[in-house]
Amino acid sequence: MDWFAYRDDGQLYCEDVNLDALAAEVGTPVYIYSRKTFEHHYDSIAGAFAELDPLICYSIKSCGNIHIIRLLAERGAGMDVVSGGELHRAKLAGVDTSKIVYAGVGKTDAEIRAGIEAGIGYFNIESEAEFENISHIAAEMGTPCHGALRVNPDVADPKTHAKTTTGKKETKFGVDIERARQFFEAYGHNEHCRLTAIHLHIGSPIYSPDPYVLAINKALDLIEELRGKGYTIDALDIGGGYAADYETGKSPAYTDYADAIVPLLRGKGLKVILEPGRTIAANAGVLLTRVQYVKTGGSKKFVIVDSGMHHLVRPAMYDAFHFIWPTHLEPNYLPEHRAMEMTHEGLETTDVVGPICETGDVLAKARMMPPVNRGDLLCVFTAGAYGMVMASNYNAMPRPAEVLVDGATATIIRRRETYADLTDAETKIETVRV
Ligand SMILES: *Cc1c(COP(=O)(O)O)cnc(C)c1O
């Protein structure tokens, strides 16, 4: 469910804002976010899991503009951060730091110190060496902190891309269940970093509740065993990875996940933590890009646009599908849903490609699309998650602006980068004494 929709005039709107008119004002490429969609997604997942009264820690890495973080925090969200930079963003946005969980395999000393200083809820612990370092730093600072051991339950959704699978034994994340027992024997009574929670995050996107059920059951067995041995475990963080509707109706609803997960966790004396990112952000954002040229090569039609892998890398990196459609249409091309296969009369097989000097710079391959012309505006849907956050300056291209729409109001929440932004960090050079 989102608030990007075509009206009868054949024009695409975000809430009450006409996207052609908006692009004319702010230029392209530009990421457009819908406030109502963010709020609706957050409220829906909170509602589906309400019986557990969970702490919902939005995954900042999916879409981390501080204005987005703030609007979710104002609704009660905590945050899942994976770096000192994300912690910085969360603090700037005014997040209650006790509602922050901090994951990531490579936390540096400075990042750990910043987390302890901020009084975050939990460090998600990824290895023995990391635990020892966190405990050492907490002791040095005289400030105890809390840890959630990231357990690798060895489950995976077969539909999840290999690059985003994290819950298999052979990934770099967490420790396997057997090692978790030894982990608690070694560190379960540590006073500086109190190991009182278990953390899971099995990958993304996960198109079925089943892998969660498997993983949570394994975690519950472990928790029962640990409690039997006298360890206090009062929280279970079940991670993120819930799918988003890249194609209309292809993902489970929040209630499908909740119906399978809630019964496992009710009455277990555990504070439940969720870390959704994609499922909240993906459909809440689109990327608008303008057609620069149309080129026919052999039997192929290339639509060359002013954005590409440098702004939205998912198609190039994960072969990800994003529905792409023009923002203004003849009524016969109105899409009744977003899907890989579209069947309107008169569609043309089209590759949508960017300006980057790489053959892999594609946004869509062999896609059936309405005919488009130079100057037309295309909407890349479901681009809110892992879009702008993964954008780069490759080929010295400034990154897009970001705009947040709220009803009939549009606000630039990140200005378009300039050429000066590209080179500012290079203007002051200094010789290093070694
Ligand atoms: C990336 C990540 C998430 C969020 O994943 P989504 O697929 O965006 O929901 C949650 N927890 C951890 C530890 C992550 O690394």
Image (tube, grey):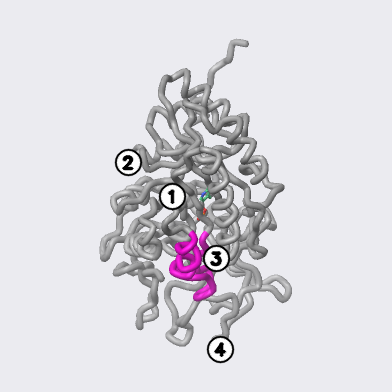
Name which residue type carries label 3. Pro
Please tell me which of labels 4 and 2 falls first in the chain. 2
Name which residue type carries label 2. Asp
Closer to us: mark 4 or mark 1? 1
Name which residue type carries label 4. Glu
Q: Which residue is mark 2?
A: 96
Q: Which residue is mark 4?
A: 345
Please tell me which of labels 3 and 4 falls first in the chain. 3
Label 2 to label 3, Cα distance in Å? Answer: 30 Å
Ligand 1 within 8 A of label 2's CB? no
Q: Are marks 4 and 2 in contact (CB under 8 Å)?
A: no
Q: Element at badge 4?
A: loop
Specify whether residue 378 is in view. Answer: no
The quadrant in which the N terminus is found is: bottom left
Please tell me which of labels 2 and 3 falls first in the chain. 2
Ligand 1 within 8 A of label 4's CB? no
Q: Relative to residue 430, is residue 361 drawn left or right?
A: right
Label 4 to label 2, Cα distance in Å? Answer: 53 Å
Q: Element at badge 1?
A: loop
Q: Which residues are magenta?
A: 242-264
Crowd tier of the residue under label 3, counting other residues whose Cα lies within 10 Å: few below 14, some 14–19, many 20 or above: many
Q: Which mark is residue 270?
A: 1
Q: Element at badge 2?
A: loop
Specify whether residue 78 is in view. Answer: yes
Closer to us: mark 2 or mark 1? 1
Identify the residue at image location x=35%, y=67%: 14
The quadrant in which the C terminus is found is: top right
Closer to us: mark 4 or mark 2? 2
Name which residue type carries label 1. Leu
